[in-house]
Amino acid sequence: MAELDYYQVLGVARNDSEEEIRKAFRKKAMEYHPDRNKRADAEEKFKEINEAYQVLSDTQKRAQYDRYGRAGISSNGGADRPFEGFDVFGGFGDIFDSFFGDAAGRRTRQVQRGEDIQRRVNLRFEEAVFGTERKLEITRLERCQRCSGRGNEPGTDLKTCATCRGTGQVRRSQRSIFGQFSQVTPCSSCQGSGHTMQTPCKDCRAAGVERHKRNIAVSIPAGVESGMQVRLSGEGDVGRDGGPPGNLYVYVDVQEHEYFTRDGNDLIYRLPINLAEAALGVEKQIPTLDNTPETLKVPQGTQPGAEFRIRGKGIPHLQSSRRGDLRILVDMQVPRSLDAHQRKLLEELSRSFNSIGDTSNGDTGDLSGPDQDSDDNKDKGLFDKIKDAFV
């Protein structure tokens, strides 16, 4: 099986920026989200997308991946490894053991890693921006407390398996065109444990594990968005035969905000103003997620779609103290209906605009000099009237 290419998974190029990678992740995550996509392989695709993004969104891990591939991100210790259970050379040892057995004659029973658990949390917009803590109730497999995972009733002895004589394996020889091979398989009588029990544990019935409900505190970092996941290592099902436990994956869904939208780490706010405010200029109080409004001076002559920016009032970058910006987009509000007074003022304004460029001698209408000051004073008074009519 070919090695997973994280760039192909997200559909990005190796020289794409962090922002391009983030946008590609968001698009892919929405496409393969298990709640939206009902294909059989959607969940597996969704896991691959998350795996790729966790590496390519981290500058250090991305550099290691670009140089060494997946081996580069799995060789720096388990604590820093984003995806546990990865083995560059996995599989070769099992193949040789299955044909030739363990060279030293030891029992080579493999431990089993516990299963992962998945949960989903729904966050308010502000919780995703500033981070929060949630308590989740999960049901997971844990080692039986009565027998400490051994499977037998406390105080009773375990017997050496008569079939495999305590090795946990049985060797079978078979002849093929390449000669005679010895194949070693787990003992079916003791399931590879090397021993049998006379009195199974009363609580777990020899399974060695039990299901328990637990309340787990999950810390959601600031800046998460829909489709991301939080991993709690070792909070999944216990591993069998002494194997490591699985992980708990918490997938994040974020509710929409009443009037803010998100663009990367920037917040978008649409500011409604009327045409008089746009022409004359106005001061507006802009809401923020910090609950402290900011004063914005909209200059005279502002056009529809104009954008203003308040630095550092956006969304925190993941694992960073930096924040994006609050971007204000001017949303010109054109009245759908006018009363008689408003209509009269607008008709007067329209005539005033038309008369500025209308000259009897056909010139372009030079607006400089004393006459222009007189016209400006007249138009200014008219604008004030219109502003009063709309505000």
Image (cartoon, grey):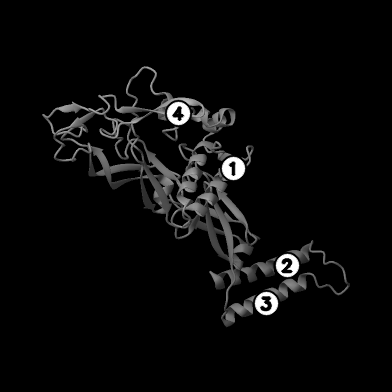
Crowding around mark 2 (Cα neighbors within 10 Å: few <14, some 14 to 19, many 20+) is few
Q: Which amino acid, mark 2?
A: Ser
Q: CA distance from mark 3 to mark 1?
A: 62 Å
Q: In whole angstroms, how far apart are the C-alphas of marks 2 and 3?
A: 16 Å
Residue on which the image places disc 4 = 175
User: Is residue 93 visible in the rendered structure shown here?
Assistant: no
- Please tell me how many numbered marks the rendered image carries: 4
Quarter holding residue 79 = top left
The reply to whether callout 4 and callout 3 are in contact (CB within 8 Å) is no
Q: Residue 50: horizontal and vertical position, in percent? A: 48, 43
Along the line of sight, the residue nearer the viewer: 272 or 237: 237
Looking at the rendered image, the disc whose residue lies closer to the viewer, 1 or 4, is 4
Q: CA distance from mark 4 to mark 3?
A: 105 Å
Helix, strand or loop at label 3? It is helix
Where in the figure is residue 305, as x and y percent of width and height? 62, 60
Q: Which residue shows up at 88% across the image and 72% down it?
A: 361
Question: Could you say which is closer to the camera, residue 369 or residue 367?
Answer: 367
Pick whichever of labels 2 and 1 is earlier in the sequence: 1
**Local secondary structure at mark 4:** strand
Q: Is residue 338 above or below residue 8?
A: below
Q: Does residue 302 sit above or below 88 in this rendering? A: below
- Give the structural element (helix, strand or loop) at label 2: helix
Q: Nearer the viewer, residue 90 or 291?
A: 90
Residue indicated by mark 2: 374
Left or right of 239 in this view: 180: right
- Circle number at residue 32: none
C-alpha span from label 2 to label 4: 111 Å
The answer to whether any part of residue 113 appears in the image is yes
Instruction: Write down the residue under mark 3.
Output: 348
Earlier in the chain: of badge 2 and badge 3, it is: 3
The crowd level at tag 1 (other Cα within 10 Å; few <14, some 14-19, many 20+) is: few
